[in-house]
Image (cartoon, rainbow, N blue to C red):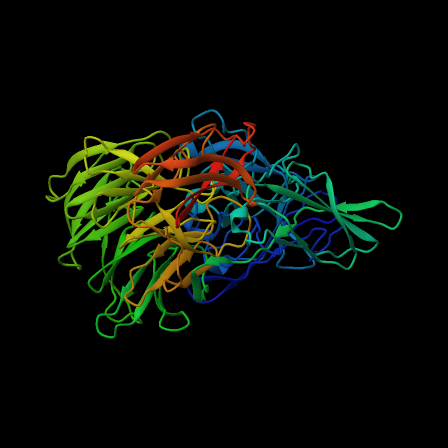
Amino acid sequence: MKTIQILKVLLGLSSVSVVFSELDILVVNEFNISETREVEPDLYWAWEPDSRWLSGVDWGGQTFYGYIGLSEIFLGSSLSADDAIDVEIRFDSNETTFCQTYRRDLDYSAAGVGVFRGSAWDISDPNNHRRLNICFVEWDDGTGEHAPNLIWDPDDSNYGRREYLFIMLSDYDGTGETYDNSNTGFDSDVIYSWWPKLRSGYTFFQTDPASLTIRTAFITNFSSLPDDGQLTLSWEFEEEGVDHFDLFYSTTIPPNNLLVQLDADDRSYLHTGLTNDEKVYYQMKGVSSQGDILYSSIQIWGKPGPVSMNMDLLGTWNERENYGDIWGYTDQITGKEYALLCVRDEGLSIIDISDQPIEVGFVPSMQFGSDAKDVKVFDHYAVLIKENEPAQIIDLSDPEDPNVVSTIHFGLSIEDGGAHNCYINGQYLYVIGLDAGGLEIYDLTNPESPQWVGDYITYYYHDIYVKDGIAYAAAIHGDGVDILDVSNPSNVQLLVNFNYEGSGAHNCWTTEDGNYVIVGDEIGEGNWIRIFDIQDLDNISMVAEYIVDPESVVHNAYVDGNLLYVAHYTEGVRIVDLSDPESPVEIAYYDPYLPNEYGYEGCWSVFPYFESGKIIASDLQSGLFVLEHQQSVNIEKPNAPAGFNLKQNYPNPFNPTTRINYTIGLESFVNLTVFDVSGDFVKTLVNSHKPTGIHSLQWHGTNELDKKMPSGSYFIKIKTGEFTQSRKMILLK
């Protein structure tokens, strides 16, 4: 008998708010058998022990990283929470449900009968399951790549092909015709709306649209490995007849090298000798005493655990779901420090971080699913920015009893008027991420009645920073960075736009002296930090890059003094010394994201401005992290007089050649050597006396015999007298 995974939605309702008291995603696979049914489809979804790409949580929870919603806010349904029933959605390659479809690009008009491979059932009566109607919305992105095809088939594109699935209260008659134009709008009987969105890189449909690809799990993010190059693999298994396990691995798919043979009782294995420049794939096979392969694994996950350097974890908080941006607030009377944490679907959590974090106040959004994106503070007020509804201005005089004093509708939409991000400088609120593009400015002198004072409408800005009457606006969709004069909010002037190859500017900040702007590229070619010298606006130039891993994605970055604090999705919080902006040095990090993978998950934002020195960070999956930088730790610095320095190579990563610059403050004997990540010698670049001054050379990615080196991480080390310094270089092929 084969097993099938069941999506089982059980709803418990309490007062007006809807609570999924139990939204059980019953995972059924060879590892963790929660329920079995005498059905045949080959459908298996990975779940535990750590990362999962099918998730189920309470109201506002995610399935396929999308959302489940209840009744009336969808398609104008007239049903209420009282109409909610227990529903089971069965994915079954042997069963087809004919569904009425609607075209999103045609104002949600009816578009004929489509196909959903599976079925939906009312299971309120355990002895008499009642099959329900389904309908879904077809997606057309206008490019021809995702044309409507009358098949429910979401994908893993950037925003997901939004083929919303609607579960109806009406009985299914086998044709799909019973859900027709007479059952739409306010007459519709939608119970649940489901938007599944796949995580990038995961395959949902194979040849049979109901079968998930049974694929080998992979472990990528080796930047989060312990320094000893060890990784713990773990698995769950409940099946009789297995005599032993064969664990395979390789840098290719499928894994083809037998790593080890393990006893049937084993549930973990420590893989040692790993390096930071490898992508390793694993597969486990269960073998009988006769040598028959009883099964091949779907998922085996590495669990290195949170990794840190010069940072301590003080506390965590995770009592809601689906988190966004974060900012800090200090009570002006008590001196208490609070984290203001966006809860994407629900509103704003106010968390006392004096000791172990505890939520003391909460501000709900105007409606569920508003997508609370950003929060900033002025005086004793906060501005909560939402993507899908007006902003809320919140009085924080009593953090335990916050009070919404006004709302702001942005852009062209009076109905929702949402935005994406904001910044507050002085009395002004600067809002970006508008449908209309560009920037809107509001005077907050009277928080109960904020006044629009100006705008600058152009292409889409994703984030903004304002200092001394100058705004730095990140135009994420390939338009670089705009530097704006906002000293007169009613007459904003463009000072300069600077763009660069492969730009995808998500956020930008300046050094304290305003001489450099730090840009984090979330999309584009190279998702990392770039530093630009802006002292001459007619000659802006990139002078350095900060790269954790060329495949990882940076998000938000903020400057405090000489330190840069970076929220780096799956790489966690990173602290970078900017004493020399042209030569950034990472000095500390804390990575709360356990899975070894890349993408838009993990650390969203960081706030480093509390007088106590506490650092707060938001993690999309795990909520709030309260951290402390061990600044007393002796961070390795160049042990030489001023004038001695090894610059970061540029470009980095590189292929096939990179330039290395170094400065010698006094005539000296210089040794400049390349090593690999294991510390093995690769090549000597300099081994001679050098005069005082700046020196430059190229490395062509070759060893001492001029043979090309493989892709990976390397270190360049300079030694002259008592001065030593190293830099990490990444060679790509």
Q: Could one spot residue 162 in this view of the protein?
A: no
Residue in front for this viewpoint, 537 or 400: 537
Q: Is residue 92 left or right of residue 403?
A: right
Q: Is residue 559 left or right of residue 446?
A: right
Q: Residue at x 25, y 70 (%)?
A: 331
**Residue 152 seen:** yes
Considering every residue shown, the one lying at the far right of the view is 290
Q: Is residue 729 left or right of residue 266?
A: left
In the image: residue 667, left or right of residue 6 = left
Q: Position of residue 205 (x, y in %)?
A: 61, 36
Q: Position of residue 650 (x, y in %)?
A: 38, 34
Nearer-the-camera pick, 447 or 152: 447
Asked where in the image residue 362 lies, by quadrant, the reply is: bottom left
State how many labels appear: 0
Rendered location of residue 161, percent (x, y): 48, 36
- Furthest-bottom residue in this view: 334
Q: Where is residue 75 drawn, in percent x and y?
A: 43, 44
Viewer-proximal residue among 712 and 264: 712
Viewer-nearest residue: 178 or 409:
409
Q: Classify 504 as above or below 311.
A: above
Identify which residue is drawn at 85% across, 45% down. Answer: 292
- Quadrant housing residue 514: top left
